[in-house]
Image (cartoon, grey):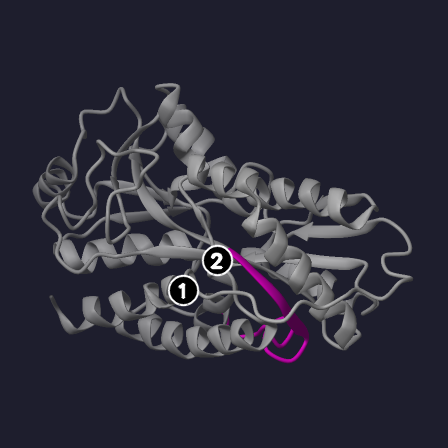
Amino acid sequence: MTVHAKSLFVATTLGTALVCAAPTQAADLPKDYPGRPIRLIVPFPPGGSNDILGRFMAARLTDRLGQQVIVDNRPGADGMIGSDIAARAVPDGHTLLIVSTSYSMNPAIHKKMLFDPVKDLAPIALIGTGPNAITTNPSQPITSVKELIAAAKAKPGQVNYASSGIGGFNHFGGELFQIAAGVQMTHIPYKGGGPAMVDLMAGHVPVLFSTLIQVLPHSRSGKLRVIATGGAKRAPALPNVPTVIESGVPGYEVTIWWGFLGPAGMPPAVVAGLNDVVAKILQEPETVKRLANEAAEPAFASPAEFAQTIRTDIGKWIKVARDAKMQPH
């Protein structure tokens, strides 16, 4: 494995260490919270993994909190537009934001941020983790990682791959694949995972790097073909699909985490109480079953642990972008 690939490998596996963490002392929410419906901002278009998981958690939070949790999709600028809206909201706990690993990648590829990802938004709770997936259209001749590598080596730079956007989780997954497999492909960025997946199903692009949670329903229906997953082991949801490592690309392990943030300055009791509510939801058999069905698994971290993960990830992804020669914009 090259130095570049090793750097990417270390950074992409950071979130998996949090899966086995366990909640500690329970915390009660203030009696007057929530006092009205809660807005959950999803900073990407409908159809992506943040949206899928966000809608599921919104329903579970609604049941637990006794107030409607309304999903508000605010896509754009690699998730920064929705995140900036959340950062500017009143910090009373009635505006939440769901983010994923790409949140910690933005400082690596954006010269100017709309907000400070460490200071302007406060971590509340980690939700889960899951592998990425390399996906093709069933009508395409590429049916395995071996065939993808062969096609890319036969025509360097002429095999296109789609992702949810420049500098996002799936873009980094594609860059790692090129480095680890020793191939050159052309990145086609989209404004979110949903639009990228639609174009893949339409046959406009041959390959998509995505989260498994996003493409799994269409894989099961036969509309898409997952040729490999990026976890350290096979995904239970697709036990017959090999990992990228099994497919002959050593060192390729790419997993994603999802979590809730809120505007900085929220009352500590609200943050602690929401963290405890999320922990309880993650322990529900229905949640465990649902996430497993979607090729994800529950994860837990205290707000402080989640904050440390974000800070560490930001530093690592900055180095990754430099090693992979990804140009900031």
Q: Which residues are magenta?
A: 110-127
Query: Up-down: is 30 above or below 173?
Result: below
Q: Secondary structure at mark 2?
A: loop
- Secondary structure under the numbered disc 1 in the rendered image: helix
Q: Quadrant of residue 250?
A: bottom left
Front-lying residue, 199 or 248: 248
Is 296 placed left or right of 59 in the picture?
Answer: left
Q: Check if mark 2's residue and mark 1's residue have beta carbons within 8 Å.
A: yes
Q: Amino acid at mark 1?
A: Gly
Q: Position of residue 265 (x, y in %)?
A: 77, 77
Query: Residue 42: x, y in percent?
Result: 64, 50
Q: Amino acid at mark 2?
A: Ala
Give the residue at mark 2. 299
Task: Name the N-terminal-most of marks 2 and 1.
Answer: 1
Name the image quarter holding the N terminus.
bottom left
> Which residue occupies the foreground of this view, 105 or 283?
283
Residue designated by label 1: 15
Helix, strand or loop for the magenta stretch, by majority: loop
Quadrant location of residue 85? bottom right
Q: Residues within 10 Å of mark 2 (few under 14, many from 20)?
A: many
Residue 79 in the image: x percent, y percent?
Answer: 58, 57
